[in-house]
Image (cartoon, grey):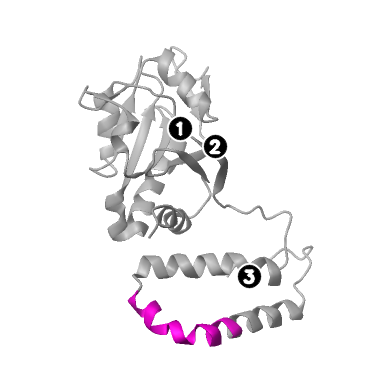
Amino acid sequence: MRHLPLHMTQPKPIGYAFLAALLCAGMVAGAPFAGRWARLGIARTRMHLRMAWRAIAPLAMPQYTDAPLQRAIHIRAPSQPPNVTFVNGHLDPFTLDELRGYGVLLFFGTLDCDRLCTHVLKQFTHVKAALGAQAARVRFVMIGVDVGRDRPHSLLRLVRSYDPDFMALTADAQTVLPFAHKHGVTILRSPHHAGGALVPLIPYIIYLNPQGLWTMCFPLGMSAEEIADEIIYSLGL
C-alpha cells in the first residue's frame, strides 16, 4: 500500500461519501443494463470502468500538486506524419501508409540508447499483453535514427528479441531526423560514445490511429493497462 507524505492535505470524509453516492447511483441506474455488461469482453469492460473512474475521481479525491498524473496526451489537431520512405529490417522500402487500418505505437531509438529503449520495448510487450486479442490490430514500431551506426537487420534483431512481431524501420539522417523533430523528439550527438553516436531523447511513445493520424502520446511512466485502454477506445471497440 502506498503511503502519502504527511505534508499532503488529507482527503475530507465527504469526498468518500460523495464517491460512494455516485457509485451507488450508478449501480442502481445501471441495473437494467446488466445483461449488456455481461456480454462485453473483458478488455472492453475494463476500459469502460477506467473511463468511468476517470470521470468521477476528480470530484471526490484530493488533487496533489506534487504527484503528477501519467495520462495520455491527446493531440488537439491530429496530423498526418510526413510522407517518408523507410527501410525495414529486410532492407525493403516501407512507408507508414502500409500500416493503415492498424493502431501504431512507435518510438525513436538506437542500439546505444541503453535503458530508455529497453524500457520502451519492455513496455511494448506489456501493452501487447494487456491488449489481449486486440493486439492483432496494433503494430509496434521502433524507428532507428542513427543509420550510419545501426544497420536495419541489427535493429530488427533487437526488437524481435522482445517480440517476433515488433518492427524496425530506419532511413538516412536527412530523412529520419526531420521526421523525428516533427514529432517533438530531440536527437543529440553523445560525447560518451565513440564517433558521436546519435541519441534520441524519448519523452513519450507516439500513437497513430488506424487512419494514420498522430492522435496521442503516452508518457513513459504511464501503465501498460491504461495505454491499452486508450488504444482500445481509439479502435472503436
Give the CA distance from mark 3 to mark 1.
33 Å
Task: Name the residue beneath numbered marker 2.
Answer: 203
Judge whether 52 appears above or below 105 on screen.
Answer: below
Question: Is residue 153 shown left or right of residue 30?
Answer: left
Seen from the viewer's position, the closer of residues 142 and 94 is 94
Q: Are marks 2 and 3 in contact (CB under 8 Å)?
A: no
Residue 29 in magenta stretch: yes
* Percent of width and height locating residue 193: 46, 19
- For image coordinates 43% across by 52% down, the residue present is 234
Q: In the rendered structure, find residue 237 and report the number of the disc placed on it.
A: none
Which amino acid type corresponds to the residue marked 2 in the rendered image?
Pro
Question: Could you tell me which quadrant the C terminus lies in?
Answer: bottom left
- For image coordinates 58% across by 52% down, the residue present is 70
- Give the quarter of the image for residue 22: bottom right
Judge whether 172 appears above or below 110 on screen.
Answer: above
Specify start and end residues of the magenta stretch as a single range.
25-39
Which amino acid type corresponds to the residue marked 3 in the rendered image?
Ile
Residue 179 in magenta stretch: no
Q: Are marks 3 and 1 in contact (CB under 8 Å)?
A: no
Question: Is residue 234 shown left or right of residue 187?
Answer: left
- Give the quarter of the image for residue 121: top left
Which amino acid type corresponds to the residue marked 1 in the rendered image?
Gln
Camera-side mark, 2 or 1: 1
Task: Name the residue beneath numbered marker 1.
Answer: 80
Seen from the viewer's position, the closer of residues 200 and 93 is 93
Camera-side mark, 3 or 1: 1
Give the CA distance from mark 2 to mark 3.
29 Å
- For image coordinates 61% across by 66% down, the residue present is 55
- For image coordinates 60% across by 84% down, the residue present is 25
Task: Name the residue beneath numbered marker 3.
Answer: 56
